[in-house]
Image (cartoon, helix red, strand yellow):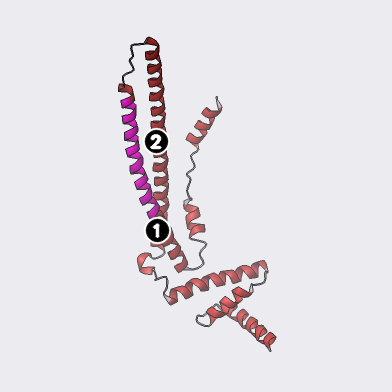
Amino acid sequence: MEILEKAAKILEECYLPSCHSNFQIKNFIIGKESSRIGKIWQAVREIQTRRESLANLANDLEEIKDNIELAKLDVQEESFAEASDQDPAKESILKARKEINIRKKERALKKLYVAQNGLLTQQNNMLNELSVFLEVFEKLGGIEAFKNYNEEDAQVEYWRGKFEREFILSNILQQPMSPEFIKSCLALAENAKMSENIGATLDIINKKLLNQNN
């Protein structure tokens, strides 16, 4: 079996879509967020991105559909073109040129069909991703659970979740917390209730900072 035939058989039997898996979407794209509101906001961002991409794909498909129709007309036009001349030698050249031009236009048409199939596959993959993000969004509470991005309670929930996760990771990895992270935690602690562990740690850090300044 030829190399290209083997490759074609493998790709036919072992198709892999060029998109995120459902598992990846749920556990990493959304799951990496450390708070419920963070997950909701991320789901909305992903939904918005894919909706815009699908609108662009729809336009691209319409454009390529028109290009295919034009390419078909080019092939037909070339086929109907007369290749006659009084000189037999020149007539032979004209016929050969016509056959070559037809083949070229047919290849151009085939490329357009391949591009169209690629866009349709991309569209199907994106629709699948969008359906998963919509499912995740609904499971998180849907529109009723959504909070405005600038709502103070929502921002507190979002940043508290991020800081608490960073705190846990620093403890697990036994790595010191950066000064900027500590400053951000202290700033948040003034306006929001942190977990007891972080609160106790921040108290110790705050006392150390005060002692250093005295």
- Residue range in magenta is 51-77
Q: Name the residue under label 2.
A: 112
Let me know if residue 84 is in the magenta part. no
The x, y position of residue 80, in whole percent, is 30, 22
Let me know if residue 75 is in the magenta part. yes
- Residue at (41, 38) in percent of width and height: 115
The x, y position of residue 55, in whole percent, is 36, 51
Residue furthest top in the image: 88
Q: Residues within 10 Å of mark 2 (few under 14, many from 20)?
A: some
**Which part of the image, by quadrant, shows the C terminus?**
bottom right
Residue furthest bottom in the image: 214
Depth order, front residue of 57/153: 57
The x, y position of residue 21, in whole percent, is 48, 50
Residue type at mark 1: give it: Gln
Q: Mark 1 points at which residue?
A: 48
C-alpha gap between disc 2 and disc 1: 29 Å
Please tell me which of labels 2 and 1 falls first in the chain: 1
